Image (cartoon, rainbow, N blue to C red):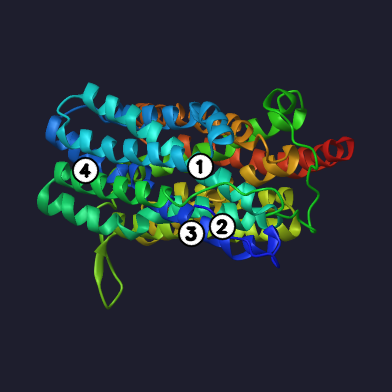
Amino acid sequence: MATTISPTQTPAQVAVGYRWMQLILGVACMIAAANIQYAWTLFVPEIQKTFGWQRAAIQTTFTIFVLVQTWLTPFEGYLIDRFGPRIMVMIGGFFTGLAWILDSYATSLAAYYVAAVVGGIGVGCVYATCVNNAIKWFPDRRGLAVGFTAGAYGFGSALTIIPIANMIANGGFQTAFFWYGLIQGIIIMIAALAMRAPQVGETWPSTNLPQSRRDFTLSEAAKTPVFYLLFVMFILTVTGGLMAVAQLGPMSQDLGVKETKVDFYFFIIAALPFALLLDRIMNGISRPMFGFISDHIGRENTMFVAFTLEGLGIIALATFGANPWAFIFLSGLVFLAWGEVYSLFSATSADAFGTKNIGSIYGTLYCSKGIAALLVPVGNLITEATGTWSTVFYTVAGMDILSALCALLLLKPMLRRHLARG
């Protein structure tokens, strides 16, 4: 969609309002794509009950989805930088809708695995493009803009988690797969029609944070120690939250709180659906909130606070999770402290390496989520072998705290030296 510039207006003046429309379009796309990842935990018990497969085998579907979503992002990022957001989001919307429609007809594990590949391609295109567009349109408010965009992916399923749960209970999980897949795909494809990247002169840099004035290529970025430290920290922090996303339903079942009713005086609800609703809200809030904070106090300082909070929250969940009230609110705390990884790492990579090739650069960093996803089925196997989630909880909590220390002690001085050389 073209923007008309009057003779008395500069591109930057026109972009002041127009870029917020681009942000809203990206948010709409992310909300529509969110359920494939965040509502999956609702379907796992129903699939296991219907077909009798091992839980670890069913969760391999989730792992395949995340691997495809993440490991194709360098290629998708290259296409975004080359062809722009409109066509990539259009393709992503089609595949996102198709994935759940395929799930609605699946009767074998192989069919679920194929649908996971399709969904990974679709959501990968949508996610990478929308985050990339926010990075490019808002260099002066990068943490906030990317936070809103990534937050929509976390918060999006909060709008539909209870309706999906009700449809699964009343009409069956296949029906929920079909109709929500169709609706989600259509929404994304319509929003894609109005998306575009900024033109020269439509953006301006931050005055609060140091940012690279040079646009690195992927090969140049990959030669810097900052790139590899961000990659390792991403793996350390994303693992715990990703495991909670996929395993919260099974965790609640094993801890004995899944069907426990909690009384809020004005309504009564089972612990798991309420925890899922609260978690999605906290996940969505955390990304713009911590992104906004990072725009003012720095990315590394914000990482230290958030990652430490996540680690402590996981330890508390391991200790008190058998209590339904504790399970609900501590899982919400974990998601509040985890969701921001997707705003902080993307904003930091753009600060360090510029925006011209950020699609391929952050796409490669985002592959760390795929590596973390490999640990999700391992968590099931460890729990089945030990009979408790404690080992898994304490391990990922330690990883979070280690990443928090890396942010403050390693990344902060390393990034300053990197920008000074640039």
Looking at the image, tell me whether mark 4 or mark 2 is earlier in sequence order.
2
Q: CA distance from mark 1 to mark 3?
A: 14 Å
Marks 4 and 3, Cα distance to the nearest angstrom? 26 Å
Distance from disc 2 to disc 1, alpha carbons, whole Å, reads 16 Å
Whether label 1 touches label 4, CB < 8 Å: no
Residue in view at x 17 percent, y 49 percent: 168
Residue at (12% x, 46% y) in the render: 172
Q: Nearer the viewer, residue 133 or 311?
A: 133
Instruction: Look at the numbered disc 4 and give the secondary structure of its residue.
Output: helix
Q: Is residue 406 above or below residue 57?
A: below
- Position of 157 relative to 116 (above/below): below
Q: Secondary structure at mark 3?
A: helix
Residue 85 image label: 1
Q: Earlier in the sequence, mark 3 or mark 2?
A: 2
Q: Amino acid at mark 1?
A: Pro
Q: Give the side of residue 379 with respect to residue 384, left or right.
A: right
Give the mark nearest the N terminus, 4 or 3: 3
Mark 1 vs mark 4, foreground winner is 1
Q: Residue drawn at (21%, 38%), measured in percent from left and top?
A: 101
Q: Residues within 10 Å of mark 1 (few under 14, many from 20)?
A: many
* Coordinates of residue 210 in the picture (x, y in percent): 81, 49
Q: What kind of residue is marked 3?
A: Ile
Q: Is residue 261 above or below residue 246?
A: below
The residue singled out by tag 3 in the image is 24
Closer to the camera: disc 3 or disc 2?
2
Quarter occupied by residue 366: top right
Q: In the image, which disc is placed on residue 177?
A: 4
Q: State left or right for residue 192 relative to residue 16.
A: left
Q: Nearer the viewer, mark 4 or mark 3?
A: 3
Q: Residues within 10 Å of mark 2 (few under 14, many from 20)?
A: few
